[in-house]
Amino acid sequence: MRTSADPTIRVLLADDHPVVRDGLAAMLSTQPDLTIVGEAATGAEALRQTASLAPDVVLMDLQMPGMDGTTATAAIRAAHPEVRVLVLTTYDTDADITAAVDAGAVGYLLKDTGRHELCEAVRTAARGGAALSPTVAAKVLAHMRGDRGAGLSGRELEVLSAVARGQSNKQIARALRLSEATVKTHLLHIYAKLDVRDRTAAVTAALGRGIIRMD
């Protein structure tokens, strides 16, 4: 972690693509106040390296083998609340954004972010501020107003994403540790908010609006 004697921001890169990590390392290393202290190819590795390397900021991809970025973010924030997690991903659906923010990420950037914006976002994250890509910020505001994501809650997004993957109510209940009755209630709320009448229409509407995505 940073000290008054060494104000350099320590950054851990977490992405399963070596070429992406190499590019990020080369980009961030041009800044005198940013230092790459480690790289991780999985969420579990990011969690382990956070414990051993004590970074200020973890630059986190979402889609990684094993423990994904959202799960890793929640684990890092629980074990090391002083560490800031900044998501850097290609995905910008409401479900991904909501899940990452709920997990404790202080920022959410897309991989088309420019070098200057990325470096400034890392600095903002290190200070504890929120760093959002313009597109993501617009979606967050729209979601808060209830228009983009039709006001779906985080749990409703989880249920809807599971429906999109073809899971039955029983499977969803087991995976989310809910009763089947609760799953049915969530679905009724989802139908009402999306103004649809069944599961297929809900998934179609959500995919069309970018509320969820298919992996």
Image (cartoon, rainbow, N blue to C red):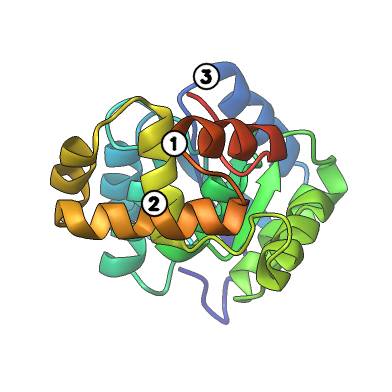
Alpha carbons under labels 3 and 1: distance apart: 39 Å
Residue toward you, 92 or 170: 170
Q: Earlier in the sequence, mark 1 or mark 2?
A: 2
Alpha carbons under labels 1 and 2: distance apart: 8 Å
Residue toward you, 182 or 177: 182
Identify which amino acid the numbered label 1 is placed on: Arg
The residue tagged 3 is 18
Q: Are marks 1 and 2 in contact (CB under 8 Å)?
A: yes
Crowdedness of circle 3 by 10 Å Cα count: few (<14), some, many (20+)? few
Whether 36 is drawn above or below 79: the answer is above
Q: Position of residue 22 (x, y in %)?
A: 61, 24
Residue toward you, 93 or 64: 93
- Image quarter of the N terminus: bottom left
Q: Quadrant of residue 162?
A: top left
The residue tagged 1 is 199
The residue tagged 2 is 187
Identify which amino acid the numbered label 3 is placed on: Pro
Crowdedness of circle 1 by 10 Å Cα count: few (<14), some, many (20+)? some
Q: Earlier in the sequence, mark 2 or mark 3?
A: 3
